[in-house]
Amino acid sequence: MHAATLITDPAEPTLDPRWVEEVRARWNGAAPRWLAEGEAAEIALPTPPSDIDAVWAELQAHGIDLAVGPAEGRRKRLLLADMDSTMIGQECIDELAEVAGIGPQIAAVTARAMNGELAFEPALRERVALLRGLDAGVIDRVLADRITCTPGGRELVATMRAHGATCVLVSGGFTAFTEAVARWLGFDSHRANRLEVDGGRLTGRVAEPILGRAAKRATLEEYCGTLGIAPADVLAIGDGANDLDMLGAAGMGIALHAKPAVAAACDLRINHGDLTAALYLQGYTRAEFRA
């Protein structure tokens, strides 16, 4: 059996039952199971339909995300989540650059790197070099004043952990930020790059080796070995090109409000829902959410 899940933005829950019924009838599915009224519903299907992309595009126009996948084994045992523009709403290096007065210069490189137009590692070195001499105390100010958690993140982590999953924040950003964000959201652990500091100021260098696209996938494989699970038991979520190997290796790889090149490469795309969409895709109801 397969499951078709329809999800909309929980801030504006406008999932009309008529759209759910139209999908059910079109694909000869079972009676809908509402995961949250007006927000998310799933339909059991006997076989995967052949016109998923066409129906997905039609529903996008109405603010509805659609995903189809196997119904068996949906609840995952490991969450690997990107941080910047995924678990938080910002790109931390861009926020540091804004404070340093070079925001547009660095943001342009970030956007190209996250869309896969530039190799991640050299692009990161280039951007960090521009921060040389910045007072390291700015990091705490950015955390306090400029960083916001993406809606649904706390529920995603708490609910999966309550059901026995391990949750890891894995970022191409910096440990100075992942340490705080992991603590805020309740992750079991975190991994990221380390900014070098000397005399209270950024040196403009990142400690090697850089955690990039290949390292994110390697983290997935490492945790699978440690936990004794298969990649099929992993949920990975991210938005940038450096997430693609991790998303492709996971049993459930979700592109969340992703860059165009990333969304085009992924079967599971969430453009309207928040991070709780990752729970709905696993078959959780809102009544089961923890926070």
Image (spheres, helix red, strand yellow):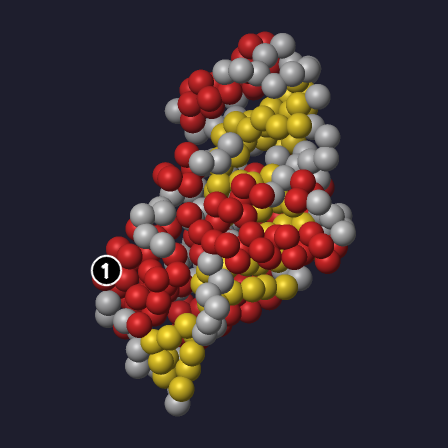
Kind of residue at badge 1: Pro
Q: Is residue 45 above or below residue 231?
A: above
Residue at position x 37%, y 50% from top?
114
Residue that mark 1 sits on:
104
Tell me if I can see residue 66 in this picture.
Answer: yes
Q: Is residue 225 above or below residue 236?
A: below
> Observer-nearest residue: 12 or 161?
161
Q: In the displayed image of the protein, which residue is found farthest to the bottom?
A: 199
> Observer-nearest residue: 152 or 133?
133
Residue at position x 58%, y 46% from top?
236
Dot 1 alpha-carbon crowd within 10 angstroms: few under 14, some 14 to 19, many 20 or more: few
Q: How many marks?
A: 1
> Observer-nearest residue: 36 or 88?
88
Residue at position x 24%, y 70% from top?
101
Left or right position of 80 against 76? left
Residue 109 in the image: state x and y as whole percent: 28, 57
For the N terminus, the image quarter is top right
Query: The residue tagged with tag 1: helix, strand or loop?
Result: helix
Residue 10 in the image: state x and y as whole percent: 52, 38
Residue 148 in the image: state x and y as whole percent: 45, 58
Tell me if I can see residue 62 in this picture.
Answer: no
Residue 149 in the image: state x and y as whole percent: 49, 56
Q: Quadrant of residue 97?
A: bottom left
Q: Is residue 197 above or below residue 250?
A: below
Residue at position x 67%, y 40% from top?
232
Q: Quadrant of residue 90?
A: bottom left
